[in-house]
Amino acid sequence: MPEAKAQPDQSEESRAIDYLQKHPETLMSYPDIFTGLSIPHQIRGVTSLVERQLMMLRDENRVIKQNLDELVNIARENEELNHRFHRLALELMSCDQLDDVLSLVRDQVQTFFNTNYVSFKFLPTINDSKKRLSSHYFDESSDVGDIATTWISGRKPICGEQKASINAALFGVDLNVESCAIIPLYHASDLGLLCLGSTNKEHFTKKMGTIFLQQLGELVSARLQGLLAI
């Protein structure tokens, strides 16, 4: 003879029903419970728990789809950046003149990162007997020299807003720079900075990822080091 199923304690069931009747918002406060309930849809004219479950699942699916779409877009952007870095590396290898390298990097980086201004700033200690960097040295009379040394020794890109005086020293006066990315250039020795400036305050922020910026700095630094020795 099959064993009889245990019947629920009527007093506990009554207390539970009584509590839910007095506090109907309880289940709304614990949405995870809905996904674990299995209740037939028998009531018309009101939103049943089954309908509520379906609505919640649709909302969850919508959020998941949005997150997936964002991840796919980020992956596509990263793939495109990888292709651009590859092309830049090939073009840098074919450049054997320092002026050509500087010009190439400015043009390509401006497109890569959709930025308004790109400039090089080299340390005064960098020797250039051919005077090719005369317009790219830090102004020794400005207050950015000591800060630049700290940035370069930190070995990591700095993103965000800077003071107007620093923007002027890095990019030039009378330019509207609202945010910037400052990339250290170093290889066998400290070289200087590659500076990206934008008129959009939100373009370069302190919270943004900097792995591509750092890789860009390392790539450009390696090519510059070889040419500066010539």
Image (cartoon, rainbow, N blue to C red):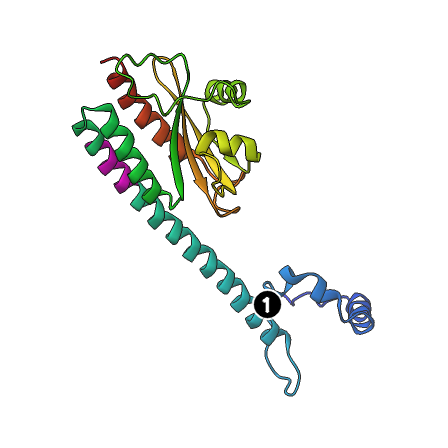
Q: Residues within 10 Å of mark 1 (few under 14, many from 20)?
A: few
Residue 188: horizontal and vertical position, in percent? 34, 13
Q: Is residue 100 left or right of residue 65?
A: left
Residue drawn at x 57%, y 34% as measured from the top left = 163
Position in image of residue 70 (x %, y %): 43, 54
Q: Tell me the residue that label 1 is attached to.
A: 2
State left or right for residue 48 relative to residue 198: right
- Please identify the dominant SS of the magenta region: helix
Which residue appears at 26% of the width and 42% of the height? 83
- In depth, the one of 181 and 34 nearer the eye is 181
Q: Quadrant of the C terminus?
A: top left
Q: Secondary structure at mark 1?
A: loop
**Picture quarter containing residue 94?**
top left
* Amino acid at the residue labelled 1: Pro
Residue 125, quarter of the rendered image: top left
In reply to whether residue 89 is colored magenta, the answer given is yes
* Magenta stretch encompasses residue 192: no
Q: Which residues are magenta?
A: 82-90
Residue 144 position (above or below residue 180): above
Note whether 34 is above or below 226 in the view shown.
below
